[in-house]
Amino acid sequence: LILARAESDVSAEIDTFSDGAAFGALVGTVASLVETAEPMGKTAQVAAVVLDYGEEDVTSPPEQVIAGLRRIIAELRDTCHRFGMAEPAIILRADGAERLDEQWAMSAFPPDRRVCVPGPRYALEADRCGRLTHDGVRRQAALDALAVETIAAGARWTCPIPVLAEFGSDPGTINVVFEASEPLVIDPNDPFSAGPNAGFDVVGDTGPKEIKTVSIKGNDPKTVQLTLTDSNPVGPLYLSYAHNRPGAVRDGWEGALAPDADPLHRWALPARLAVH
């Protein structure tokens, strides 16, 4: 028996979401699943819960949204424990333009290995209104399923994510360190039209800084090195990757969607970092 449910409510703030109708209905669904499984001699298990919440809340500051998501995840775990279940995989889908920093924080510092963002939104085809196309939905579903299977097997599903930006030893260089499961790739085909900067931008107090080259650092396959046209930039700098635009960085993992479809990849998640 496989049960799939979607619950929603009209919560406009993260603090009311965990107390809203959707969460209450989810708890009731878990209880019903256990009651259904017992007479059949089956063991009930919630394999995964997708939290699709972000842009609905336009008032809460980032730290409040992050704390709210962590609280909901803890309550989901407690609910499963109460019914004697193992903890489910938690799939986060908060990739809207207004909540990228929160997505970064939940991905770079997840509550545990069972929490993940299977892939960034820029890697999924959407129409002019921002809705996923049929191909986008198929790819999102395939990545979700692969992430759940990986987590169920006891491993982590980790899309590459920038965690540190620092000035390099050579003038005008910035090293961007990623957390990644495999060596990084700057896709030469640039499938999302990220451009020659591969999705990176650098901004200072006086405006954007021109990026001359983007490459994988020779002695570190999980670091991307940027070279600026300005060899001696002045003032604080801030680096962003795929922030409200596409990127071209992924790791070496490849999965199959269909024989006639482009392969699946783990594309890097958006980030915005101060350069140290």
Image (cartoon, grey):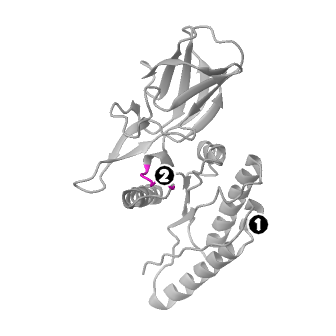
State left or right for residue 107 relative to residue 265.
Answer: right
Task: Give the x, y percent position of residue 145.
Answer: 42, 60
Q: Quadrant of the C terminus?
A: top right
Up/down of 176 relative to 106, above or below: above
Q: Going 71% across and 21% down the picture, which residue do you hit?
A: 205
Q: Is residue 46 magenta?
A: no
Q: Secondary structure at mark 2?
A: loop
Q: Nearer the viewer, mark 2 or mark 1?
A: 1
Q: Which residue is mark 2?
A: 118
Q: Which residue is mark 1?
A: 16
Q: Going 48% across and 25% down the picture, which residue do you hit?
A: 224
Q: Amino acid type of disc 1?
A: Thr
Task: Give the x, y percent position of residue 106.
Answer: 63, 48
Q: Which of the two residues, 58 or 42, is positioned nearer the viewer here?
A: 58
Up/down of 53 relative to 169, above or below: below
**Does residue 120 appear in this view?**
no
- Which contiguous range is marked in magenta? 124-129
Q: Going 52% across and 42% down the picture, which residue do you hit?
A: 269
The residue furthest left is 259
Q: Amino acid type of disc 2?
A: Pro
